[in-house]
Amino acid sequence: MTEGAAGGAAGDCLALYDLFAAYGALIDAAEFDAWLLCLPRPAPTTSCRARITNANCRAGLVYCDSRAMLEDRIRALREANKYNIHTDRHLIGLPRLTGEDGNAKLVEAPFAVYQTDQEGETRLFATGLYRDRIVVEAGGLRFRDKLVLLDTFAVPSLLATPL
Amino acid sequence: MSGNAGEHTCIYHQWCYSFDGRLRSIPFRRGIRGKGGFDPSFDMAAHGLRKLRVASVSGALFGTLADAVEPLEDYLGAPVLAQLRGLFDRPVTILGYNRQRIRGNWKLYAENTRDNYHASLLHEFLVTFWLDRSTQIGGVKMDPRHRHNITWAEAESDTAELAQEGYGAAHVRSNYLSLQEPELVRFRRERVDSLNIAITSVFSGAVFVQISNSLAVRQIRPRGIDEVEILQTTLGYADDPPDLTLHRLRQANLVGPAGLVSMEDGEAIEIAHRASHPDRDRTTVIELGGAGVISDRDYRVTDVPLRGFWSYYAELLGIEPSGAVR
């Protein structure tokens, strides 16, 4: 799957599943440009936030409150940061509709991310909960606000690739 | 998890301790119906918890289990005291916590925060996005015993030409990129000084970090020989206006286990630990800047504070070679 945004309306469960499936699969495939398409397009009127944080913390391990900051993160990952070469594997549980806010749907989904190193050894890297606002944009679903709430608040080694 | 308890009770046998560590009560001390229980000579006062000696610098608490210690202000020394009093010159607010588990010995992390040589080489983000370069005016400042260190650098104290000349000549990357969100690295001057890097390492396990406008306290918590946990508390000031809080939240991206500047430390320490661990009967010491006197430096390509750290560590463990430089 290489399409970033899923088709259909926000209330459409299959479209919702497709959005989460694309989100995880694109990170695992290191297709970060396509992954960014899961988020709103850059425009003066659209904002998006993506945070990775622990419960009750304002500061995140990652705190991006614009598409530009997310793109900077990906650029840094490619151009500047050095980290353990690994493969990510997202296992994302079924999303649950928890409410509505205007034309956005509030959705939660549990996740686990495993990392496999160059020796072929796999370890559980993190579990947690996505707490998201999802909107329809250009005929597809996108994350407007993505909160990655970690259960695993002791990060093993380092966190480089997106969760 | 958070909250407050009025006492400490061990779940195992429900021995109960007061906040000052005294043993307050134990169940069945006299047994049941005159049978069992503790010997009448059992002295509650002799079975309290080990007490920490605690002292504060502007609200930052330091503790030790040692019985005989010099006063905290003497231990820290004038430069570190001044730095901490500046950092905590008004009430702080906690923006968040994070923890990082690194599979390496804790002393590699203590070295890391004192090692100026690696900063702009390992952490390529600093140079790539023009935040911190070894060509800036900066250096290292230590206490008289050289066990602590302040790594400092002044913002905008070099030029693009100077940096490109320095890094280009060393065949290190000098093709700078720009960020789409320049606020991520924009330094807002907050104090009379213009330091955009101030990393204060206090022996043995505390680090006070200012990188641009991100502020944090790190505790180095050894988890045995082969693992260390870094507990980081991200700070702001209680009187920060909302836009400055947002700025700090954005710049918190620079530090911590996912830090654009600092994530590499986790990997570097694990590599160094894996590489050195098998050779326990061998040593390799290369002193950057040469041997000799351990002293403050007003340049950045140096690792002389590491020698201070090891000198004091060796003294504490009683393994200091005779004639060693302190």
Image (cartoon, rainbow, N blue to C red):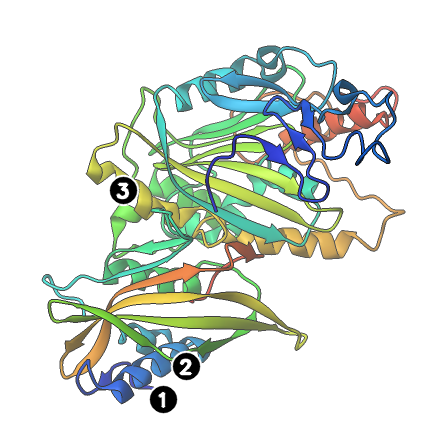
Residue B172 appearing in the image: no
Answer whether labels 3 and 1 touch (C-beta < 8 Å). Answer: no
Q: Give the residue drawn at x 31%, y 85%.
A: A18
Image coordinates for residue A62, horizontal then vertical, percent:
38, 55
Residue B214, by quadrant, is top left
Same-chain status of marks 1 and 2: yes
Other residues around mark 1 within 10 Å, as few (<14) / some (14–19) / many (≥20):
few
Answer whether labels 1 and 2 touch (C-beta < 8 Å). Answer: yes
Q: Quadrant of the C terminus of chain A?
A: bottom left
Q: Give the residue drawn at x 77%, y 52%.
A: B276
Relative vertical location of residue A7 with respect to residue A152 in this rendering, above or below: below
* Measured Cα–Cα span from mark 1 to mark 2: 7 Å
Residue B293 falls left or right of residue B85: right
Name the residue carrying label 2: A25
Name the residue carrying label 1: A1
* Measured Cα–Cα span from mark 3 to mark 2: 32 Å
Image coordinates for residue B57, horizontal then vertical, percent:
49, 17
In which chain is the residue bearing label 2?
A
Residue B247 badge? 3
Answer whether labels 3 and 2 touch (C-beta < 8 Å). Answer: no
Other residues around mark 3 within 10 Å, as few (<14) / some (14–19) / many (≥20):
some
Residue B290 badge? none
Q: Nearer the viewer, residue B267 or B178?
A: B267
User: Given the image, on which type of amino acid does mark 3 rest?
Assistant: His
